[in-house]
Image (cartoon, rainbow, N blue to C red):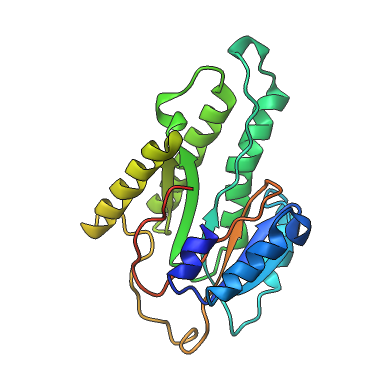
């Protein structure tokens, strides 16, 4: 996702994960993104920790405001229904729903163009042995629907299984955006307070691997399968 955004002309990426710059491959990713023309900041933060998340977002300089969020975290704890416990289900919910709610609260008052979450087709059709993961994704999509009902930006992308399914999902999203059915990152005019500023965004991940998010200044195609 970070590479796709950088290739699309994003000026700055703030990559957030629990391990931050210590994550395997973080240095290489930073170098690659810079070569694509994006400035990069990597921060260590569990997005489900509201206090730490507010600190990270609050550290953004005024001349580079937060303009979009991409939440791509997820945790799997597979098992048959009779083996599930509240703690196992909570782990799945924390990565998806708790982190999304923390991002929702931490970004209140910011002029966001997009609030994008990565969900899964499993939240719709379910899957054997993934009751906790299914519930977490269904709850995440319901949360995004609540944001939209409040007039806030919100887009949930439900990825399918396997490269072909993901490619189909990406093409469907792109076609829907082209017809105006789901405009997650609409073209917009800068507000007086943000005129002349460089766009800066944040993304979150509760997994050790950094993920990226940003706000392109123009409509762009859906990301390739990841």
- The spot of residue 34 in percent (x, y) is 60, 74
| Residue that sits furthest to the top in the current view | 82
Q: Residue at x 24, y 59 (%)?
A: 178
In the image, residue 100 sits, relative to residue 114, either above or below, namely: above
Position of residue 63 measured from the top left corner of the image (x, y, whole percent)? 59, 85
Q: Residue at x 34, y 61 (%)?
A: 221
- 188 or 175: nearer the eye? 175
Considering only vertical position in the picture, is 221 above or below 64?
above
At x 49% / y 71%, what residue is drawn? 111
Query: Residue 213 location, x and y as percent?
Result: 54, 62
Asked whether 35 or 141 is in front, the reply is: 35
Q: Is residue 214 above or below residue 205?
A: below
* Location of residue 33 by image quarter: bottom right
Position of residue 33 relative to residue 144, above or below, is below
- Asked if residue 46 lies left or right of residue 199, the reply is right
Q: Residue furthest right?
A: 22
> In this rendering, does residue 181 appear at all?
yes
Is 173 displayed left or right of 11 in the figure? left
Residue that extends furthest to the bottom in the rendered view of this protein:
196
Residue 191 found in image quarter: bottom left
Q: Position of residue 225 (x, y in %)?
A: 43, 48
Is any part of residue 54 visible from this angle?
Answer: no
Residue drawn at (59%, 13%) of the image? 81
Give 210 or 187, whichever is nearer the viewer.
210
Number of marks? 0
């Amino acid at each position: 996702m970070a590479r796709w955004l950088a290739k699309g002309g994003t000026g700055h990426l703030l990559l957030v994960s629990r391990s931050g710059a210590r994550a395997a491959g973080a240095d290489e990713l930073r170098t690659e993104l810079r070569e694509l023309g994006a400035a990069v900041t990597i921060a260590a933060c569990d997005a489900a920790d509201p206090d730490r998340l507010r600190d990270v977002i609050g550290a953004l300089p005024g001349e580079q405001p937060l303009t979009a969020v991409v939440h791509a975290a997820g945790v799997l704890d597979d098992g048959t229904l009779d083996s599930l416990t509240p703690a196992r289900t909570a782990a799945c919910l924390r990565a998806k729903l708790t982190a999304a709610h923390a991002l929702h609260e931490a970004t209140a008052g910011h002029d966001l163009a997009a609030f994008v979450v990565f969900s899964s087709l499993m939240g719709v059709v379910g899957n054997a042995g993934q009751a906790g993961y299914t519930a977490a994704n269904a709850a995440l999509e319901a949360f995004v629907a609540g944001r939209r009902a409040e007039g806030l930006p919100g887009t949930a992308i439900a990825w399918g299984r396997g490269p072909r399914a993901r490619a189909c999902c990406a093409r469907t999203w792109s076609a829907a955006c082209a017809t105006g059915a789901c405009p997650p990152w609409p073209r917009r005019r800068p507000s007086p307070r943000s005129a002349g500023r460089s766009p800066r965004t944040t993304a979150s991940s509760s997994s050790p691997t950094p993920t990226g998010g940003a706000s392109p200044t123009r409509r762009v195609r859906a990301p390739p399968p990841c």
